[in-house]
Amino acid sequence: MPTAVIAGGSVAGLGSALALSRIGYRVVVLERAPNPPRWPPAQAVPWWRRPTVPQGMHSHTLTSLGVRVLRERAPEVLGQAAAAGARTFDLTRALPPGATDSIRHPGDDALVALGIRRSTLELLLHRQVRELPGATIRHDTTVDGIELHPAQARVRGVVTHTGERIPADVVVDATGRRALSRTWLRNAGVPLADDLSSPSGLRAYSRFYRLKQGTYPTPLNRGHAVGDIYDHYAGVLHPGDDNTFSIALGTLPDDRALSGLSTAAGFTAAARATPAIAPWLDEDISTPLSPVQVITSPPNALWGTAGTRQQPVAGLFPVGDAACITNPLFGRGMSLALAHAFRLADLLAAQPAVDVAQRRAVARMTEEMFLPWYTQSAASDRARIARWRSAADGTPLPSKTPSGTGRPTTEDIAAAAHRDGTVWRGLMRMLMTLATPAEAFADDAFLARVRQAAPASLNRPRQPDRDELVHHVLEAEGAPL
């Protein structure tokens, strides 16, 4: 039985353990955080401290891709999530009123999302892996490096922070945004391929709440969430498991005028000023569960070590964020990590020899999977950063250069989606990670529908403008106006 050592016990690492164990691997998960409590999820999650996963304390969702992976590959985890109070949302309920093609279509059953806190999902995955025959999870253990065969063409094990050597046929880097395989390779003398990188331009402020009655005070205007990405900030609310929900407010990282969002008073004032979110904060509806958590998102990155340009080292496989990071505003991270883990296992099952050919095949699969999402996220972030920067300090928006293709923009598609149900489904499949932008939008018939859709007159609640939002935050803090 071959052995896989997995560095990292979060979503990507635990998903990899599940996937690889099912194709005959003995798995050893090495996780630097402490063991989680063995209590029921409702009691364990608040006490499970994850200082090694700072993003774990922020808003998350599981998109349609992640739900599909669990349905097909780990239905027991999906069942346990439901038992823990996670809700599955039918996204077609958010189909705009008056849109064409509103009757149920084939494929609509895939348009679902799962409302669950990241810590709850990780706890359920952890318990599933812990019970697997031939699986071991070791906590308080850090992987400091890899050992290579003399020719440096294949891994033969890892070295922990204590100097312990653990042999392995394959090593999975599930260390998340740290992507430690880059350091391991560099220290082993293997040249690193160049990365693709682009700024995410986001600082996120999150806070968790619990509903007092368990009923939602408003419909979910995004199908699985409430709120939007506005012209100078983001305000989105995500329902979670066990009658919880989280609110995430996003700004530019250097937006000092809104630094007061890090305080409970400033955060609450901004959330209450966001029309779609305000009703959820009524004292009869919910109560806070956590302080405000702050995190600056790393750049979008497609790590060169995960792709085809990297000098191949057989048996070393970055997974999830250790292969590619995209802006968390899109909510794709957990879903892409689970999908990547099971695609890796499928490829290793079809091509079991641990050699350079196998490593090249995994690199091609990884690039094909992540490059479209990196490209979409980088382009979207550039446009949003320019828009938010203009609102914050008056920087002129860059003039649009005609593409010459005559193809509708994403903004055109979003506007048409309010009138055309087929366009809406295409947009939603892209947003929920079921189809890449090219797969969702490249069809000529789809683009024709976008062009033919009558301009939508959107009746959206008015969000606060820039000056109003800053005023609300400063006033709540007691700062001079």
Image: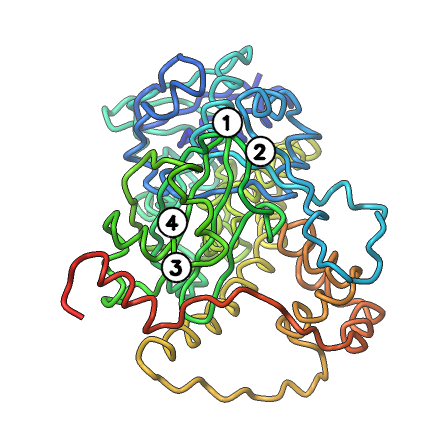
Residue that lies at the very extreme toward the front in this rendered image: 284
**Distance Cα–Cα, label 1 vs label 3:** 55 Å
Quadrant (top left/top right/bottom left/bottom right) for the N terminus: top right
The numbered mark, 2 or 1, whose residue comes first in the sequence reads 1
| Residue beneath the point at 35% across and 84% down | 395
Q: Nearer the viewer, mark 2 or mark 3?
A: 3
Task: Quickly name the residue at label 1.
Answer: 169
Q: Real-space Cα distance between discs 4 and 3?
A: 52 Å
Q: Is residue 368 left or right of residue 124?
A: right
Contact (Cβ within 8 Å) of mark 1 with mark 4 = no
Residue 411 in view here: yes
Report, in whole angstroms, how far the alpha carbon at label 2 lies from the one at label 3.
56 Å
| Secondary element at image label 1 | loop
Residue placed under numbered mark 3 in the picture: 273
Location of residue 38 (image quadrant) = top left
Measuring from the top left, give residue 299's x and y in whole percent: 39, 59
Q: Residue at x 38, y 54 (%)?
A: 272
Secondary structure of residue under mark 3? helix
- The residue under label 4 is which amino acid type? Val
Residue that mark 4 sits on: 190
Q: Amino acid at mark 3?
A: Ala
Whether the residues at callouts 2 and 3 have beta carbons within 8 Å, the answer is no
What secondary structure is found at the residue carrying circle 4? Answer: loop
The three-letter code of the residue at mark 1 reads: Asp
Q: Residues within 10 Å of mark 4 (few under 14, many from 20)?
A: some
Residue 342 in the image: x percent, y percent?
62, 34
Q: CA distance from mark 1 to mark 4?
A: 19 Å
In the image, residue 393 sits, relative to residue 59, either above or below, namely below
User: Which of the two labelled residues, at mark 4 and mark 3, occupies the earlier sequence position?
Assistant: 4
Q: Are marks 1 and 3 in contact (CB under 8 Å)?
A: no
